[in-house]
Amino acid sequence: EGRLRHGSHSGSVCALAVLALSYNQAPALSRGVTARSANNLRTVAANQLKGVNPATLAKVGKAVTQLVGPNASPAQYKQLANEVACATAIQGKNNFLRDAACANVEWYGPNRQNWYPGGKDVVPPHLKGELPGDFGFDPWNLGEDDLQERANEELYHGRWAMLGAAGILGQDVLSKMGYPIDAKWWNPGKQLLEGKPIDYLGNPNFVHASNIAAIFVAQFFLMAGAEIYRGYYESEEGSQGMYPGGMFDPLKLAKDPKKMQELKVKEIKNGRVAMLAMLGFYVQGFSTGKSPLDNLNDHLADPFNVHAPTSFN
């Protein structure tokens, strides 16, 4: 990459060699280059490499091996190729190649965004940028022993938090819109425990829940079915079973692998925000006894006197 930035011939050959390796392993992206670019990238790479003597190619191969290591996987070659292609696209102002190659460099690999800008030395060694949402932050080394499992657990909790936050705010919004629904999200569960029936959306003809034992049994079997389904695909596909693809992908989210990598990052980022929101809902609810939107309205009406410290007091 250093040679490439200086525009040397060796840097260009290295870039072309790595790109040729990568795009041969990325047929979807290669087809896109063929269809939408004026020059077929692989053809250009092949033509350029024909004019290079074997000794130079050997040096290029050695340089690539030094960059990715002697036992590199195809994914590591592809990551290097993306980084070189991204740098080439930015330098040559090739917008099509930039869109294709730079998207994942921003989120994955050693040159990804860091939680502490410019501070690569603060990134723990077990965080290599291979997982979605890895910004080099793990001050307590929670992922040192089993990073993939910790990442899966975070994803579970993030998804539940997004569903929970949407449910809590949806209940609050519907209450403000005039539906006969209690805005306080903890009250329906409390009413069931007290033996009082609840009506979904305030309509007894929709879902009239009155038997907590029946609700428990129904949720048990529904959750067990979902967990068995997930566990089967995890055993078949490893961590890939955590994401859409295979038999379960009704929205075709995994159709574009490159876009899917970006969606994984967006999901975990939103999940982290939702987990913080849920913590805020818990603390606010049990310290003020009000719904989230009521707390927000009180704060907006008098921001200097209604805030977290006064709520606790």
Image (cartoon, grey):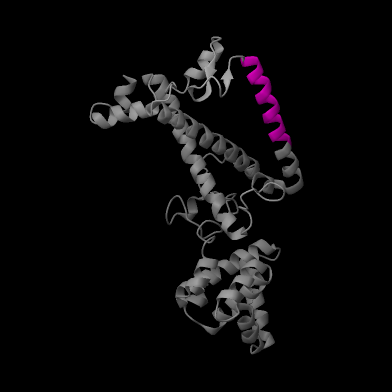
Q: Mostly what secondary structure, the magenta segment?
A: helix
Q: Position of residue 131 (x, y in %)?
A: 59, 51
Judge whether residue 224 is colored magenta: yes
Q: Residue at x 45, y 54 (%)?
A: 119
- Is 299 on the left-hand or right-hand side of 188? left
Q: Position of residue 108 (x, y in %)?
A: 55, 57
Q: Which residues are magenta?
A: 212-228
Q: Position of residue 74 (x, y in %)?
A: 69, 64
Residue found at the far top of this picture: 194
Is residue 134 visible to us here?
A: no
Q: Position of residue 135 (x, y in %)?
A: 50, 50
- Is 29 on the left-hand or right-hand side of 182? right
- The quadrant of the rendering that contains the C terminus is top left
Q: Residue at x 65, y 15 (%)?
A: 213
Residue found at the far front of this picture: 205
Check the image and report above or below for 231 versus 130: above
Is residue 163 visible to us here?
A: yes
Q: Residue at x 51, y 49 (%)?
A: 266
